[in-house]
C-alpha cells in the first residue's frame, strides 16, 4: 500500500517514512536508511526520519554516521520547534560522543 502511495506521490514524506519503518521492522536496515534519506532529501524538516536513522546507525555501531545524522536532525528540530525530538536526539548524540 505504501509503495502504491509513493508511486503516485514520491514526495509523500509520511508514506516514505512509513516504508522505512516497515523495512526496519523486517530487519532490513540498509533499505530503511535509504528510505529515511529519501524522506529528508524531499522534506528536510521531517524530524522523525533523522531521529530514527540516527538511532538505526547507532545500533549498527556506525557512530560517525549517527552523529552526523543526529546533528542534522537537531537543526531540523530547531527549525520546526520540535523540542521533544531535539532532547531525545541530543541525549543520544551525547552518549555517542562520550563513547557509550
Image: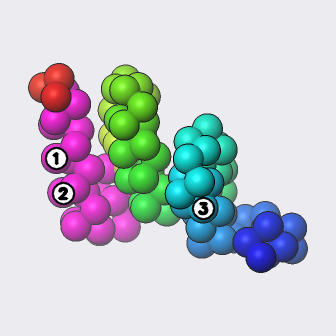
Q: Are marks 2 and 3 in contact (CB under 8 Å)?
A: no
Mark positioned earlier in the residue sequence (3 or 1): 3
Taking depth in this image into account, of 60 and 46 the one nearest to the observer is 60
The span picked out in magenta is 74-97
Q: Position of residue 23 (x, y in %)?
A: 62, 54
Any mark on residue 68, and which? Answer: none
Q: Is residue 18 left or right of residue 62?
A: right
Please give the residue where the numbered disc 2 appears in the rendered image. 87
Q: Position of residue 80 (x, y in %)?
A: 37, 67
Residue at coordinates 79% horizontally, 67% vertically from top-left?
3
Q: Is residue 81 magenta?
A: yes
Instruction: Tell me the crowding category of disc 3: few under 14, some 14 to 19, or many 20 or more residues within 10 angstroms, Cα based.
Output: some
Secondary structure under the numbered disc 1 in the rendered image:
helix
Mark positioned earlier in the residue sequence (2 or 3): 3
Any mark on residue 22, and which? Answer: 3
Q: Is residue 60 left or right of residue 84?
A: right
**How many marks overall?**
3
Distance of mark 3 from mark 1, alpha carbons? 25 Å
Distance of mark 2 from mark 1, alpha carbons? 6 Å
Distance of mark 2 from mark 3, alpha carbons? 25 Å
Chief secondary structure of the magenta portion: helix
Residue at coordinates 48% horizontally, 56% vertically from top-left?
49
Q: Are marks 2 and 1 in contact (CB under 8 Å)?
A: yes
Q: Quadrant of residue 96?
A: top left
Amino acid at each position: 500500500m505504501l509503495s502504491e502511495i509513493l508511486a503516485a506521490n514520491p514526495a509523500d514524506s509520511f508514506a516514505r517514512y512509513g516504508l522505512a519503518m516497515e523495512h526496519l521492522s523486517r530487519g532490513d536496515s540498509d533499505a530503511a536508511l535509504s528510505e529515511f534519506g529519501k524522506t529528508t532529501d524531499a522534506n528536510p524538516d521531517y524530524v522523525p526520519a533523522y531521529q530514527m536513522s540516527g538511532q538505526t546507525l547507532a545500533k549498527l555501531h556506525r557512530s560517525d554516521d549517527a552523529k552526523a545524522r543526529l546533528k542534522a536532525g537537531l537543526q531540523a528540530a530547531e527549525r520546526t520547534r520540535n523540542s521533544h525530538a531535539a532532547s531525545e536526539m541530543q541525549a543520544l548524540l551525547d552518549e555517542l560522543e562520550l563513547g557509550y
